[in-house]
Image (cartoon, helix red, strand yellow):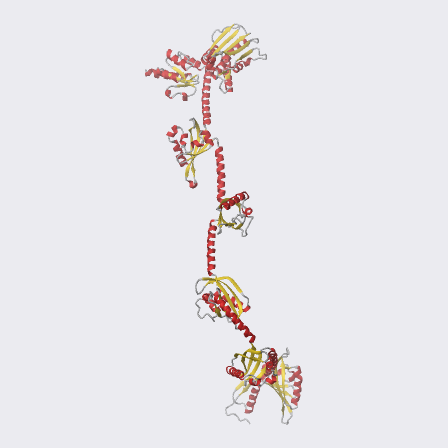
Amino acid sequence: MVAMLLEEMLLDLGCQVVGPARTVDMALKTIETETFDGAIVDVNLRGTRADPVAAALKDRGLPFVFATGYGEAGIDDRHKDVPVIQKPFEITTLKSILMGVMASVATSR
Amino acid sequence: MIAKPSKPAKAARVRGLVLTAEDSREEYRRKLARIALDSLVQFVGLLDVDGTVLEINQATLDAAGIVLSDVEGKPFSASHWWQVSEEANAPLRDAIKRAALGEVVRWDAPIRRRADGEDIGILDISLAPVRDDQGQVVFIAVQGHDITERETSTRELARRCHESESHKRLYETVLSNTPDLVYVFGRDHRFTFANQALLNMWGRTLEQSVGKSLLEIGYEPWHAAMHEREIEQVIATKKPVRGEVSFPHATLGRRIYDYIFAPVINADGEVESVAGTTRDITDRNLAEEALRQRTAQFETLLNEAPMGVYLIDSNFRISAVNPTAKPFFGVIPDLIGRDFDEVIHILWAKDYADELVRRFRHTLQTGEPHITLESGERRRDRGVDEFYEWRISRIPLPDGRFGVVCYFRDISAQVQARKEMAESEMRFRAMVNASSDVVYRMNPDWSELLDLRGRDFIADTEDPSRTWLKKYIHPDDQTNVMQAAAQAVKNRSVFELEHRVLRLDGTVGWIFSRAIPLFDGDGEIVEWFGAASDVTGRKLAQEALRESEARFRLIVESAQDFAIFTADFEGRVTSWNSGAERILGYAAGEILGRSGAVLFTPEDQAAGWPDIEMRTALAEGNAESERWHVHKGGSLFWASGLMMPLRGEGGSVRGFLKILRDHTDKRREEEQRKLLLDELNHRVKNTLSTVQSVAMRTMRSVRSPMEFQQAFGSRLMALSQAHDLLTRGNWLGAELGDVVRQTLSPYFDRTERRVKYGGVALKLRPNAAVMLNLVLHELATNAAKYGALSKAAGQVSVTWTIDHDGRRGEAEILWQESGGPLVQAPSRTGFGATLIRRGVSEELEGDVELEFASSGVTCRIRFPIEENVVVA
């Protein structure tokens, strides 16, 4: 349902949505096979920490943000610089965070 | 005729009479006569012939304290200032009459005071007639002399003469009856008196004897001459002469006589006569002779006797001292004959000597013997203490008088030895007393207590006691005491025991008692000498300590939830309670002596925490900690700890006490709670996101706010109900049957024909439960709006199954509607269908077959068991 919400919001923001991936394995497969500009990673994917997903995205230099209901405490130390959007989501916050992430990636390229 | 004096007359004034030169000779003489008359100390007066008073001289008036007018003209015989006795009054009147007739009368008149009639004197009164020139008696001259004294003397003399006479008679009676011979010689050596005894001896009467000389009486010439010389000696010296003479008695044979001649001195101091007494001493002399012989034996005996003997004579002079007694008197010169009183005062101090002398005198006077078994004092002459046993008795001495004999024995050595013994014993006793509270003596087999000094601890006893056990020993210890005593008797060794006693004040006390056996020459036990100390205080303290320790141990041991152990300064474990064994896993034997550091994790050991805790405890008084500790098996447990320094007497630190409490469970609970709170937060936020998602989708599918309110409200309710179920199941999961029943319950009727459901027990995970709840809610809502539940005859059945292909199997829920209106497939895909498809695929990883058959909607939901079901 959360994925449905994000999908709806992203569509409202004019994004094309790839996914969602329900598990870490599906997410990694999606990263391998699909092409996209950024990702929203739920910290907890059906009870499994999404750290490998974050690592894979970082390896590829793809910008991403974490979505979580745990607050910042749930984020691994390696990803302290990754922006976090808190549940429940507000579309303006989602937009500004995504814009920020995309912009920083664009300038670093 | 008196010649006129050649010298001029004397001028004077006497009792109113004035003598002047102008006086005529006649007048001058008359005045002198008057003065003479008035000054006479005797009574002079002039009476009329009838006896009335005419004149009395002034001296008499003065002596009587009267004036002439008091008596003038009154009868002389009845004068109130003097009075003759009644018997004398008549003779006086008679005398006055005779004097008036011309006779000179002289008469002694007793006079007395008028008041009490006592005779006070005798007056020699003379009455002389005074004739006129014709020879006629005209006056009577009275003259009186006080002869009281002379008269008294005369009477006294007469009385004495009478007494003397009766004494003489008495003496004569006595002398006549005495066996002694009594006699008196005149200065001419002739007998003037001889008593009856002497007359009897002579065979003569007194008359035949008085005036005779000794020779005339029949004494032998030598005998008579001897006595006459002696009579002369007495007359010359005025002193008695004593002698002894032996001569044949007329009837008794030869006798021995003792005699004394004594002077009889008259008023002029001259020897008037010589009185003699003679006593027959024949028998006494024989007795004395016998005594002398006995005394000789006695003296021999005394001289050889081992005991000191000396004799005091009747004059209290030392008359004999035997050789043994001589050293007693020391170096007093000329001892024999010296005054005993004086000698004794040389030997002893005054008080002691006074008492001795008093004793001797008492015995000498009364004959009462005296014995002193022990008496002693410091010698004045020698300066040492000497002790004697002595006895004194009165004995007759050869001179016929009494003396005192004293027998004595010098016991100084024994007394000294005994004193030293006593002192030694006293010192010993003092020593024992100083170190003991009770001193006692027991008989050889301990059946009898001979003596006990309790020093206010337990009662004293002076008399031997057979009930001592009952009296002194606590009932519970009596057996112990008797066993220990029997053991000591058997082994002939020391008795030693700590036991309870009944104290003087009735309370129970503890003593440490020790007794040693005393042996006689044959090695037999004579008695036991014991001493005991009061150890009540120590004992009570020990007991209190023991109790306290036991209590403490009980507390420590029973504290199963606490590991309590002590460690020394180096941190080595010195004690270990059962709680410690339980919590830390080590048995006491395994850990004692090892360092307590093993209980810390390697990290904490490396950081020096064991030492830090000890230092903190020393510095702060205690050290608290919350840390992981290591169980013997290697597992970790969380513990709260408190370490304190253990202080000994005087406050010095002897080690440490550590108390640990296993708080692993508490920590787990805390962690669980934190986890739960985090999870709750997560879920709430997920739920809110779900609500957000549902609201957004619902909003986009409705045409009016009213429609939104209805659609959103019912979906929210479904979500809420799903949460209720999960809450009931502790958020661990919910039964699929419950989810189905709850979703469909609004449509149940009384016949229960409209809704049927059933399947295997399947406990859904929370996410699956929430999702399926929403999915089934969409289906039910749709059925109620357009399908089977919109018509009374319509029916819905929900069944679920699982295949039996192990864990990888799937569950299938089949939703079937029938009896409803004809179904038309929706013209577009609404949110309900989207929610059903995507919910199942994305949340359950399952798939959905939704068919809008004309007979009724069918929905087949499949999902993997592993991901969505709680496996029991």
Is B855 on the left or on the right of A73, as rendered?
right
Is B860 drawn above or below residue B306 in the view shown? above
Please state which of residues B469 and B528 is positioned toward the viewer in this rendering.
Answer: B528
Is B509 drawn above or below residue B332 in the view shown? above
Residue B25 visible somewhere in the drawing: yes
Can you name the residue that lies furthest to the left here? A109
Please state which of residues B613 and B700 is positioned toward the viewer in this rendering.
Answer: B613
Q: Horizontal and vertical percent for residue B321? A: 48, 68
Is A60 on the left or on the right of B327, as rendered?
left
Q: Tell me the quarter of the picture where residue B199 sits.
A: bottom right
The residue shown at (67%, 84%) is: B90
Q: Horizontal and vertical percent for residue B7? A: 50, 91
Is B548 drawn above or below residue B426 in the view shown? above
Q: Horizontal and vertical percent for residue B828? A: 47, 7
Image quadrant in which the N terminus of chain B is located: bottom right
Please state which of residues B755 and B825 is positioned toward the viewer in this rendering.
Answer: B755
Is B805 on the left or on the right of A30, as rendered?
right
Q: Horizontal and vertical percent for residue B444? A: 52, 49
Can you name the residue that lies furthest to the front here? B253
Q: How many marks?
A: 0
Residue B534 visible somewhere in the drawing: no
